[in-house]
Amino acid sequence: MTEPILLEVKEVSRSFGKFQALRQVSLEIRAGRLCALIGPNGAGKTTFYNVVSGRYRPTGGRVFFEGQDITQAPAHRRVEMGLLRSFQITNIFPALTVLENVLVPLVVQHGKSFACLGSIAKRRDMAEEAEQILSRVGLTGQSHRVVSTLAYGDKRLIEIAIVLARRPRLVLLDEPTAGMNPEETDRMIRLVKELSERSETTFFITEHDMKVVFSVAERIFVLNQGSLLADGTPDEIRANPEVKRAYLGGSLDAAGL
Ligand SMILES: Nc1ncnc2c1ncn2[C@@H]1O[C@H](COP(=O)(O)OP(=O)(O)OP(=O)(O)O)[C@@H](O)[C@H]1O
Ligand SMILES: [Mg+2]
């Protein structure tokens, strides 16, 4: 069975002055598949996520989410529709506890003002939901810790928990393992894989470690100098002569793939 298309990007371009960071990129993301966007530094990956998440408008082309044209939709509207980009660590409140950080987006998600939190029953419901989300990302038992006291890898897991609290359909994760040690990287990648298998959320990640990409992604998109060079399964990408020539040759050999 073919899964429905969640995200459809049609001939999207983005220029900064005379520089073309994205050149007529077209791709489709289907529900339920863990997809990865790869490419050398400066290939346009972050720019692509900025266009899809609504931070930048494309200078050409269109973006559709679940069949709706969102090319001009503001970022907050995309979030309401279930298209989220990971918040950077700077969006976490370091002085609040882990639980409170997840409660904030839950309150927003439930459309409740903070005043409503005065109701003890509602507070309990939301706290339970927050605890459930924290257990899904492996932070059980950490809820009452103040975020600033946590290790870097745990802070980035809170980022994922905050995203999950919005019940997303599609999550764009731009280098979720950046700055992590090998154990933290392994934990983050296993989590993303598990969430993409067990939840209603589809993940689209960028990642520089080719070993990681080829072991977890079901579909890989390759950007090179702003153009989509290839799109396929890990085996197809590995065997693609153009990809090898332009980019992967060295990285694949280095990663022993
Ligand atoms: N706001 C901006 N203004 C001008 N140029 C920009 C802007 N954002 C990105 N660029 C340029 O667009 C190109 C693509 O950048 P982008 O950050 O999207 O690459 P990337 O694939 O995410 O790279 P990396 O792997 O290093 O994160 C780069 O040459 C960058 O300098
Ligand atoms: Mg980038």
Image (cartoon, rainbow, N blue to C red):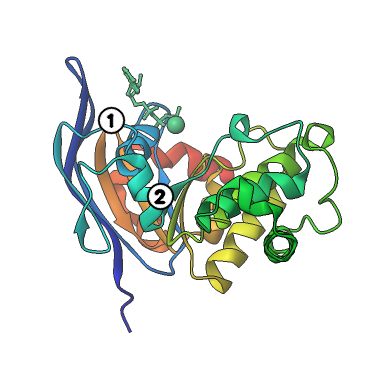
Q: Earlier in the sequence, mark 1 or mark 2?
A: 2
Q: Residue at x 66, y 50 (%)?
A: 102
Residue 256 visible somewhere in the drawing: no
Callout count: 2
Residue appearing at x 62%, y 66% in the figure? 194
- Report whether the residue tagged 2 is closer than 8 Å to ligand 2: no
Check the image and report above or below for 257 versus 67: above
Secondary structure, mark 1, is loop
Relative height, residue 23 to residue 73 (above, below): above
Instruction: Give the numbered dot on residue 33.
Output: none
Find residue 46 and report its horizontal and vertical position in percent. Answer: 40, 34
Three-letter amino acid code of the residue under disc 2: Val
Q: CA distance from mark 1 to mark 2?
A: 28 Å
Name the mark on residue 79.
Answer: 2
Report whether 123 appears left or right of 142: left
The secondary structure type at the circle numbered 2 is helix
Q: Indicate which disc residue 225 carries.
A: 1
Instruction: Name the amino acid, label 1.
Output: Gln
**Residue 20 at x, y = what percent?**
20, 24
